[in-house]
């Protein structure tokens, strides 16, 4: 994986002294100091107390938060413990940074999932979960879109605006290719890929329904949705600057065994600037490591996660469909279209051959999009 160490995060990253790629994590334990007068005492004799020194040896008190941190770190995967090494001398600094990240969470929308919600092959959302107040993402003066049914959570939409403005200042116009996807859309897409490439291969690059970051309304696929995107101007800019705006690469190179998915240089999830700094400084810039740690920390500390669970599962989750769909259920395969003259990247995306949208997507809990003046110029339909 190529770390995005920009001047924005370099100082913090260098200060952390976190070791990536070591075989195992080690933690120093100061233990109980040993009196020098005891060191050379015969094994079968009890040493006489020192006459000169009246002070007794007192065991060093262990910081309870340090102990909890050790236990959480020790509960993580073998590769996590091999990559992430936090020494005793760093624990106070780590806990300070963690507190800042958890404090930032308090500013997230109260009626929707936390931006830190852990979703992966083991952690899901229900088939009825739809982000609140989804806002349409349409082409304007600062970004282009590949299709006309894109949408994001309102807070994430605002984050896209900020990043798009930053990109525009550097001469880059972002191309938004995929955003929110409903449970049903992801189900049809995954089943189609199973039929096309087999279940084992599909599992490497496509999420099963209920496990996709896209269903959260907080993730975007940019550009051409292929590995060549990494070497485009847009891809390089996102790699270098996305974290400055709170956007994190979800599936980095050479971490398929950690994330469950192949490298996706085009897939970014909005988690906020504080979390991006925390991820870069302490977790080898691997989003999955940080999300797993935060979830485990909350569990260990007994923090109430029932609100997120209630939002994620309004009803009991449906068992994932394992069978290959019939022909009538298949979504249309992705195809390439030539972009507009001012867009140099080819766009690959799911598109219907008919006039209607390929999948009906419920835009919000109320069934209506939120319309606002974004001051981003004319919208191109």
Image (tube, rainbow, N blue to C red):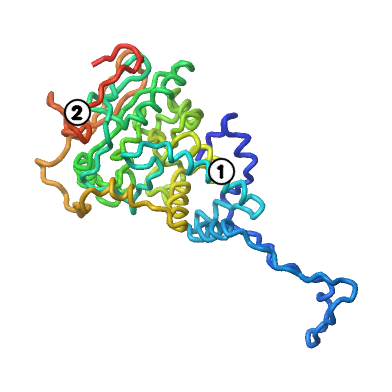
Q: Distance between the residues labelled 2 and 1?
A: 39 Å
Q: Is residue 317 above or below residue 284?
A: below
Identify the image quadrant of residue 282: top right
Q: What residue appears at the point 62 percent right and 44 percent down from the top-left corner? A: 16
Residue 304 location in percent, x, y? 39, 53
Instruction: Tell me if residue 24 can be seen.
Output: no
Residue corresponding to mark 1: 97
Neighbourhood count class around disc 1 (C-alpha, 10 Å): few under 14, some 14–19, many 20 upward: some
Q: Residue 365 carries which label?
A: none
SS type, badge 1 = helix
53 on left or right of 224: right
Residue 284 location in percent, x, y? 54, 44
332 on left or right of 120: left
- Which residue ends up furthest to the left in the rendered image? 328
320 on left or right of 221: left
SS type, badge 2 = loop
Residues at marks 2 and 1 touching, judged by CB atoms closer than 8 Å: no
Residue corresponding to mark 2: 368
- Depth check: give the residue in front, 105 or 166: 105
Q: In this view, does 145 lie above or below 5?
A: above
Instruction: Tell me if residue 91 can be seen.
Output: yes
Q: What residue appears at the point 89 percent right and 76 percent down from the top-left corner? A: 51
- Which residue ends up furthest to the right in the rendered image? 52
Q: Which of marks 2 and 1 is nearer the N terminus?
A: 1
- Which residue ends up furthest to the front in the rendered image? 54
Residue 261 location in percent, x, y? 37, 46
Neighbourhood count class around disc 2 (C-alpha, 10 Å): few under 14, some 14–19, many 20 upward: few
User: How many numbered tags mark residues here?
Assistant: 2
- Depth check: give the residue in front, 77 or 246: 246
Q: In this view, does 198 lie above or below 243?
A: below
Residue 381 location in percent, x, y? 23, 16
């Amino acid at each position: 994986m190529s770390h995005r160490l920009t001047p924005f995060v370099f100082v913090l990253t260098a200060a952390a002294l976190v070791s990536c790629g070591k075989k195992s994590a080690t933690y120093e334990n100061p233990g109980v100091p040993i009196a020098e007068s005891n060191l050379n005492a015969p094994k079968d004799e009890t040493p006489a107390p020192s006459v000169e020194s009246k002070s007794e040896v007192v065991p060093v008190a262990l910081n309870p938060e340090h102990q909890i941190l050790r236990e959480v770190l020790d509960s993580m995967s073998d590769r996590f413990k091999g990559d992430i090494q936090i020494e005793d001398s760093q624990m106070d600094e780590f806990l300070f940074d963690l507190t800042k990240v958890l404090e930032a969470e308090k500013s997230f929308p109260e009626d929707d999932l936390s931006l830190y919600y852990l979703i992966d092959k083991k952690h899901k959302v229900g088939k009825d979960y739809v982000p609140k107040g989804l806002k349409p993402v349409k082409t304007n003066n600062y970004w282009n879109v590949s299709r006309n049914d894109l949408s994001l959570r309102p807070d994430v939409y605002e984050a896209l605006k900020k990043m798009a403005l930053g990109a525009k200042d550097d001469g880059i116009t972002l191309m938004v290719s995929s955003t929110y996807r409903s449970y049903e859309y992801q189900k049809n897409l995954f089943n189609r890929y199973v039929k096309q490439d087999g279940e084992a291969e599909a599992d490497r690059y496509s999420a099963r329904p209920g496990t996709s970051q896209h269903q959260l309304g907080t993730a975007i696929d940019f550009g051409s949705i292929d590995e060549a995107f990494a070497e485009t101007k847009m891809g390089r800019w996102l790699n270098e600057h996305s974290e400055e705006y709170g956007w994190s690469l979800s599936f980095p190179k050479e971490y398929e065994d950690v994330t469950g998915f192949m490298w996706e240089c085009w897939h970014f999830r909005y988690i906020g600037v504080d979390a991006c700094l925390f991820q870069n400084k302490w977790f080898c810039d691997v989003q999955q490591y940080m999300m797993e740690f935060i979830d485990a920390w909350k569990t260990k500390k007994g923090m109430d996660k029932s609100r997120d669970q209630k939002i994620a599962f309004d009803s009991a989750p449906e068992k994932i469909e394992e069978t290959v769909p019939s022909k009538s259920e298949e979504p249309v395969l992705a195809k390439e279209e030539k972009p507009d003259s001012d867009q140099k990247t080819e766009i690959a995306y799911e598109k219907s051959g008919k006039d209607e949208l390929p999948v009906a997507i419920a835009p919000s809990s109320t069934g209506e999009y939120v319309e606002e003046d974004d001051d981003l110029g004319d919208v191109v339909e």
